[in-house]
Amino acid sequence: MDATYRSGVVSFLDRIGLLSPRLTVAHGVWLKPDELQVLAAREVIISLNTSSNLRLGSGIAPARDMLARGVPLALGLDGLALDDDGDALREMRLADVLHRGPGFVKGIPRPALFAASMAVAPRAVTGLRNHGQLAPGMAADIVTLDYPAMSADVIEGMLDASDLVLARGTAQHVIALMVAGREVVKDGEVVGVDVPAMEAELTAQINAQKDTLVNQKRIVETYQDALRSYYLSRQHLCGCAGGTGAGGKHGAD
């Protein structure tokens, strides 16, 4: 991107009018300080996908700098939670731990972390700003956790509830979920659909496509090897044709 857009891709997107509160940028791992400043001024949301970045080797996003510059920060999963469990509570804990500062440098403030998950993330999806509070006029999106299960060995009054959620909370502690006033989870079970039956049907459909998927995997791996070779040879920086190889003239430029 830097080789193609010499003035910066964020500057280019700003010039064509794409940057606005309606836009959510995923990851933002390699955004520069001046680019964060522009995104903050345009109220562009950045969706932090901590697990995904770790699994893909993309790097660690400058989350503290994003917040310090006023960028609206959301939390996402990008379909790649560390345990393949889609657990948003675990993702909050990982973001909290990974983006802490070294030594006495403060990490993501607790209110900002919860807002990223419960207020800004819904805004990125819906465009609405009525999430993140239990108050009149706000969306009735409510998750209920099994607090006794998390706090059996905790001395009451010694620990803030938010600390406990971030230390131990997982999807297994969700006992109820209401979305826009509609009950979605009750007593730890999804309401209105047979989840085990859906999973069994999905597994059967996948297994029926096994041969096709195995063949596609070989094709994808071939493309991945070619892409890896191309970028490691740095040919994308010179705009030259392929075929010079990593040790060729263009690869050394």
Image (cartoon, rainbow, N blue to C red):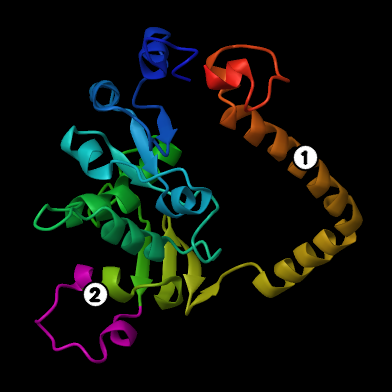
How many discs mark residues in the rendered view? 2
Q: Amino acid at mark 2?
A: Leu
Q: Which element type, helix, strand or loop, lies under badge 2? A: helix
Q: Label 2 belongs to which residue?
A: 164
| Residue 120 spot, x, y in % from top left | 32, 43
Going by the image, does 36 lie left or right of 90? left
Q: Is residue 188 above or below residue 182?
A: below
Task: Examine the structure image and report whether residue 84 is included in the region drawn in magenta.
Answer: no
Figure quadrant of residue 37: top left
Q: Residue at x 69, y 19 (%)?
A: 244
Residue 231 drawn above or below residue 77: above
Q: Could you say which quadrant of the image residue 40 lies in?
A: top left
The circle on residue 19 is none
Residue at left 76%, top 71%? 200
The amino acid at mark 1 is: Thr
Give the residues drawn in magenta, as a range.
146-163
Q: Which residue is mark 1?
A: 222
Q: Nearer the viewer, residue 31 or 162?
A: 31
Q: In what element is the residue under mark 1?
A: helix
**Closer to us: 145 or 23:** 23
Q: Position of residue 129 (x, y in %)?
A: 30, 39
